[in-house]
Image (cartoon, helix red, strand yellow):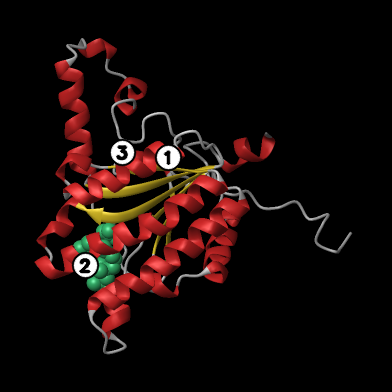
Amino acid sequence: MNATDDVSPSPLPVHLAVIMDGNGRWAQARGLPREAGHRAGAETVREIVTECRKLGIRYLTLYTFSSENWNRPKTEVAALFSLLLEFLGQEVPRMEREGIRLNILGDIDGLPLAARTALRHGMRRTAANDGMVLNLALNYGGRAEIVRAVQELLREGVSPNDVTEESFARHLYTAGQPDPDFLIRTSGEQRLSNYLLYQCAYSEFYFTPVPWPDFRVPQLHEALAVYGSRSRRFGKTQEQIDAR
Ligand code: IPE
Ligand code: IPE
Ligand code: MG
């Protein structure tokens, strides 16, 4: 037994959401094309996914491509999707082995055919895994997700009284999943950029200046330690929380 064994571990988020920002600036600071930043960012994804699985985080949600990212130069969008295919080719077999279930949040039908096919294949191959859910938010926008949920409810002819927070949440891409406990955004920006607008009602936020390619295991541990020190009250008083 070593000295740290009797220290009770600080709570881990059940659901960790990340806005992986700063690939472009990371590359530009090195005189490299933005695509090189995305490639370096993909390496970070591998490392962070592996570590989260190891730590026992149950849901990891990565903002991979927003519905607004279509406004980027065509060449950058093409590079991002070719990187996604490469990533899935290498990582799906590993996810299969390591008990990770791949899931997509967003409008899959609006993605290029090759990406759609690879993603569906990845989801099928990992469907039975229950070690950790890896949500990739792809062609995702929070407002569009909410509007889509309203459309589905109307289409089902649900009566207004039957629209509850629970029934509404069942029509979101995250149906059946707990809300993110912790949201990390890298690279200095302090905004949501249309990410998980409904689900982040009570998430703890963490902003770091570190760009995504440099956000590695030590930086993740540092962020998780901060999460562990936060006091989540959900509208109650601290005294009520302490009395539990
Ligand atoms: C995040 O990095 C990756 C995607 C949005 C796909 P950025 O590409 O936004 O990097 P910056 O913000 O321009 O540095
Ligand atoms: C958010 O980052 C989207 C992803 C990380 C995929 P952006 O770089 O697109 O966000 P804005 O444009 O700076 O708000
Ligand atoms: Mg950005």
Secondary structure at numbered mark 3? loop
Left or right, 64 with respect to 179, comes to: left
Which amino acid type is marked by label 3? Tyr
Viewer-nearest of discs 3 and 2: 2
Q: Amino acid at mark 2?
A: Ala
Residue bearing the label numbered 2: 79
- How far apart marks 3 and 2 lie (CA) works out to 30 Å
* Mark sitting earlier along the chain (3/2): 2
Q: CA distance from mark 2 to mark 1?
A: 25 Å
- Please provide percent x and percent y for residue 139: 21, 49
Q: Residue at x 50, y 70 (%)?
A: 216
Identify the residue under disc 1.
Answer: 125
Q: CA distance from mark 3 to mark 1?
A: 29 Å
Q: Residue furthest right?
A: 1
- Looking at the image, is 92 positioned above or below residue 72? above
Tell me the number on the disc at residue 179.
Answer: none
In terms of depth relative to the viewer, which is nearer, 208 or 78?
78
Q: Secondary structure at mark 2?
A: helix
Q: Position of residue 65 (x, y in %)?
A: 25, 55
Q: Which is more N-terminal, label 1 or label 3?
A: 1
How busy is the neighbourhood of tag 1: few (under 14 within 10 Å), some, or many (20 plus)?
some
Q: Residue furthest bottom?
A: 31
Judging from the image, what secondary structure is the residue with disc 1 in? helix
Q: Is residue 193 visible?
A: no
Tell me residue 164's x, y (percent).
31, 19
Answer few, some or many: residues within 10 Å of disc 3's Cα (few below 14, many 20 plus, some between 14 and 19). Answer: some
* Residue at position x 55%, y 47% in the image: 97
Q: Amino acid at mark 1?
A: Arg
Residue at position x 50%, y 45% from top? 96
Q: Is residue 212 above or below residue 169?
A: below
Mark 3 lies on residue: 198
